[in-house]
Amino acid sequence: MCVSATAEARTGPCILGKPHSPRCRIWYGKVTFVGDGDTLNVRLDGMKKKAFGPRVRVTGIQAMEEYVYTPDRKRRRGECHANEATARLEDLVKLSKGRVQLVAQHASSRSGRRLRRQVRVKIYHRWRDAGRILMAEGHALPLGNRREWALNTSYRRLAQRAAARHLRIWNPRYCGAGPAQFARLRVWVNSDPPGRQANGEWARIKNLDRARSVAIGRWWLRDSGLRRYTFRAGTTVPAGGSVTLHVGRGTNSATELFWGLRQGIFDNEGKHGKGDGAYLFDPQGDLRAWMMYPCAYQCTDPYKHDVRVSVHPSGHEYASVKNVSRRTIDLEGYRLTAGAYGYPFPAGTVLQPGDVLRVDVKGDPADDQPLRKYWGLDNFILLNDGGAARVSTYNDIVLACRAWGTGSCSR
C-alpha cells in the first residue's frame, strides 16, 4: 500500500544546525532514480518495496537541463554543466547509501507534478543539505521560492560566493573557448515595477569595452527559472554601449529589444528574500555575465557614501543627488527609488565633484539635461507625511538614503 507524501512526517528545524529556524516537516525515503541535478525519485518509507516513488524537485536550486534522463552517465545528454550537476547529486545520494530526508515547510508544496522538497543526505553519520552542497560548489543557480522560503537567503549567499570564485557554472570559460571570449559585459535588471507591468521590466547588457562591439546573436538570457530569450542573429552590443531587452511588447530596434510577454518575470525581493537574477549565456552554454538580487555576499560598492540625497515632497516634487566625493561619478547602472517606484539613471548621467542632479517626478524624459532629469510619471509619489528615497544598485546595495516625516531608511 502506498503512503501519501503528506503522511508520517516528523518535524524539525528547516535549516540544519539552526534550531531556531522555521519548523519544517521531515520525511524519510530511498532514492530510486536521479534524473538531473535538481530532480530525483524517492520511495517514501511505508511504500511498497518495488515502488518507484514520487518525483521530487529539490527546493532552492536550478541546475542546467538534461535532455536524456538515464542512470547511465555515458548516455546522458544535456546543456553544459547539466551532467556534472546530475553526477554530483548522484554521488551524494550514493554516499548516503540512497537514504534521504525530504524537508518542507508545507507538505503540499509542489512544482507542477513534482513534490518540492529540500533533500538531505547522510554522509559520515551526519545529515547534510544536498542543495547547499551543490550551490556552494557552483553546480546550480539559486531559485528562491515564496512558500518554501527558509533557505532563500542562505542559498543566494552561497551562490554569490561561488560566483565570486568563478566555480563551475560561474566559470565563463568552463564550456570551452566561445565567441568574443574576452569581452567584458555587465548585466543588470529592472524588476517588478508597480502593477507587475511587463513593459516596466527589462534587462540591460552593457559592453564595457569602448573599442570593440560584441555580437550576441544566438546568445540567450534567462531568469532563475526556465524562461529564456534567445537573441536573434545580428544582435550586437556596441562598443561602450548597451542593448536593453524589455520583457513586454514593442517594436525591436538595434539596441531596444522586446521579449513579447504579457506579465513580468523578474521577481522582486519579497518578504523572505526571494529575489531573482538575470543570466547571459553564450551559444556553448558558458555563463558570461549575470546579476543576482538582492545582494547577500560582499555587498559593497565603490560609490557608497559618495552621494547625498535630498527630497522635496511638497509642490513640484523632485529629488536631488549630489556628488560629495572628490571624483567623477557615473550613475548608469544605478537607480533612485521612492516607495514602489524606481528611476533608472540613463547612460551619460555623470556627476563631477560637487555637481547636483535634480530628478523631477513629472515631466518628459525627452527634455532631459545633463543635471536635470525627468522621471516621466503621471502622478506624484513623494508623500507629504513621510517616506524615503534611496540611490542604490540594482541588487539593492544602498549608496545613500534620505527619509522624511514618518519614513525611515532602515528596512
Image: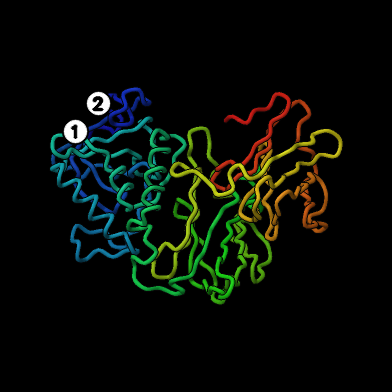
Upstream in sequence: badge 2 or badge 1: 2
Q: Is residue 58 above or below residue 365?
A: above
- Closest to the observer, 91 or 348: 348
- Closest to the observer, 205 or 221: 205
**Which amino acid, by three-letter code, is at mark 1?**
Asp
Residue annotated with mark 2 = 8
Q: Is residue 365 above or below residue 13?
A: below
Quadrant in the rendering for residue 50: top left
In this picture the colour scheme is rainbow
- x and y percentages locating residue 135 in the rendered image: 33, 47
Crowd around label 2: few <14 · some 14–19 · many ≥20 (10 Å): some
Crowd around label 1: few <14 · some 14–19 · many ≥20 (10 Å): some
Instruction: Specify the quadrant that holds the C terminus.
Output: top right
- x and y percentages locating residue 260 in the rendered image: 61, 60
- x and y percentages locating residue 52 in the rendered image: 20, 45
Of helix, strand and loop, which one carries label 2? loop
Q: In the rendered view, does 281 fall on the left or right side of 334?
A: left
- x and y percentages locating residue 204 in the rendered image: 59, 59
Q: In the rendered view, does 404 fall on the left or right side of 193?
A: right
- How far separated are the C-alphas under marks 2 and 1? 9 Å
Q: Which mark is residue 45?
A: 1
Query: Which residue reaches farthest front?
Result: 326
Disc 2, disc 1: CB below 8 Å? yes
Q: Residue at x 64, y 68 (%)?
A: 255
Q: Residue at x 58, y 75 (%)?
A: 211
Instruction: Specify the quadrant that holds the N terminus.
Output: top left
Q: Which mark is residue 370?
A: none
- Closest to the observer, 250 or 273: 273
Q: Residue at x 67, y 70 (%)?
A: 253
Q: In the rendered view, does 3 fall on the left or right side of 61?
A: left
